[in-house]
């Protein structure tokens, strides 16, 4: 018999709860990868002496796809202007 005022915590030990936590962790890792790539991309552009406008910086920082950011990072090594990292999008 439960004590008066006791809270049922069984959900937090359930398979569904664990699945939700795992999904949250995966999303957090993905966001971390994207943030790291964005920082790397901005660093490359700045170290190359290219002018990084507010709009370019915003677009890079708001991109949440690590693969897109990787493509932009590869381009950042050779582009003549920071805006050119986006290709012909």
Image (spheres, rainbow, N blue to C red):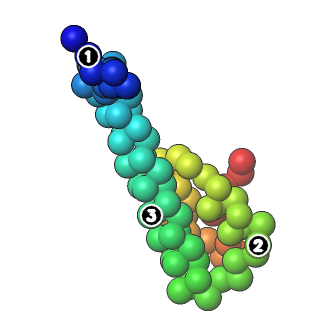
Label 2 secondary element: helix
| 22 on left or right of 54 | left
| 81 on left or right of 22 | right
Q: Nearer the viewer, residue 17 or 26?
A: 17
Label 3 secondary element: helix
Badge 1 is on which residue? 2
The residue at the point 61 percent across, 52 percent down is: 63
| 59 on left or right of 47 | right
Question: Which residue is farthest left?
Answer: 1
The residue at the point 58 percent across, 83 percent down is: 46
Label 1 secondary element: loop
The residue at the point 62 percent across, 62 percent down is: 61
Q: In the figure, 76 relative to 11: above or below?
A: below
Instruction: Answer yes or no: is residue 70 visible.
Output: no
In this rendering, which labeled residue sits more in front, label 2 or label 1? 1
- How crowded pointer 3 is (Cα within 10 Å; few <14, some 14-19, many 20+) is rated as some
At which x and y percent is residue 83?
A: 72, 67
Instruction: Answer yes or no: is residue 25 visible.
Output: yes
Badge 3 is on which residue? 36
Q: In the figure, 56 relative to 46: above or below?
A: above
Q: CA distance from mark 1 to mark 3?
A: 48 Å
Q: CA distance from mark 2 to mark 1?
A: 59 Å
Q: Point out the image quarter for the N terminus.
A: top left
Residue 10, picture quadrant: top left
Q: In the figure, 56 relative to 8: above or below?
A: below
In this rendering, which labeled residue sits more in front, label 1 or label 3? 1
At which x and y percent is residue 41?
A: 52, 69
- How crowded pointer 2 is (Cα within 10 Å; few <14, some 14-19, many 20+) is rated as few
Counting labels gives 3
Q: Which mark is first along the chain, 3 or 2?
A: 3
Q: CA distance from mark 2 to mark 3?
A: 19 Å
């Amino acid at each position: 018999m439960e004590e008066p005022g006791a809270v049922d915590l069984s959900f937090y030990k359930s398979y569904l709860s664990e699945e939700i936590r795992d999904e949250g962790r995966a999303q957090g890792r993905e966001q971390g990868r994207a943030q790291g790539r964005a920082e790397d991309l901005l660093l490359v552009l700045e170290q190359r002496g290219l002018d990084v406008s507010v709009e370019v910086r915003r677009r890079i920082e708001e991109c949440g796809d690590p693969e897109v950011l990787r493509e932009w990072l590869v381009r950042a090594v050779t582009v003549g202007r920071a805006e050119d990292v986006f290709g012909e999008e």
